[in-house]
Image (spheres, grey):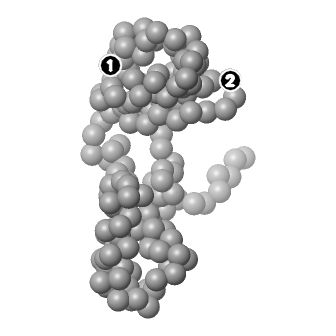
Amino acid sequence: MTEEKKHEILRLLHTNSRLSTEAIATMLGESPEAVSEVIKTYEEERVILRYSAVVDWDKVESGRITAVIDVKVVPQREVGFDAIAERIYRFPEVKSVYLMSGAYDLQVIVEGYDIKEVSRFVSERLATIENVNSTTTHFMLKTYKEAGVIFDDGEGDRRLVISP
């Protein structure tokens, strides 16, 4: 199988991880066995890390809150930002950690069930880590699009507002 088709398998699974190997094989003109072997190799090489669903949690849970926390740190000799990032991503509340350019070094995404829970995490666990200089917390108010998926169901009123 060509590298282009292997990458196409990744793109298809990234868009819809529920596609069957048979469906992917049909789309690419390959055998299901060849597609299955490529997927297995990508899983073993940790190119595919896991399969997940994009969920609109606001429709099933109230009070759930997500915060984006910008963190300024002092990089450590020999390991740079890696040791601090690892310490942060090991907290169960942390959903993502990114090394960033710009005013802050790390961007941390945290989920909790209320503002107090997230605030407690920042003040008691994150801000107290050695070499963390400062944090800025932004609470997400609404999700419009995530992982390429638009959350608006498109059924709303799309007429323009007319004012007198």
Comes first in the chain, label 2 or label 1: 2
Q: Nearer the viewer, residue 62 or 104?
A: 104
Residue at (53%, 30%) from the top-left corner? 107
Give the secondary structure at mark 1.
Answer: helix
Find residue 16 and report its horizontal and vertical position in percent.
39, 67
Q: Amino acid at mark 1?
A: Glu
**Drawn side of residue 134 relative to residue 14, left or right:** right
| Front label number (2 vs 1) | 2
Residue at (27%, 45%) from the top-left corner? 60
Q: Is residue 70 visible?
A: no
Q: In the picture shown, does residue 24 fall above or below 152?
A: below
**Drawn side of residue 10 relative to residue 72, left or right:** left
Find residue 79 and report its horizontal and vertical position in percent.
52, 25
Q: In the picture shown, does residue 148 fall above or below 1?
A: above
Q: Nearer the viewer, residue 98 or 156?
A: 98
Q: Which residue is mark 2?
A: 103
Q: In the picture shown, does residue 92 fall above or below 13?
A: above
Residue at (51%, 51%) from the top-left corner? 145
Q: How far separated are the C-alphas under marks 2 and 1? A: 26 Å
**Drawn side of residue 26 relative to residue 100, left or right:** left
Q: Quadrant of residue 96?
A: top left
Circle 2 packing at 10 Å, graded few (<14), some (14-19), many (20+), is: few
Residue at (60%, 25%) from the top-left corner? 105
Q: Which residue is mark 1?
A: 117
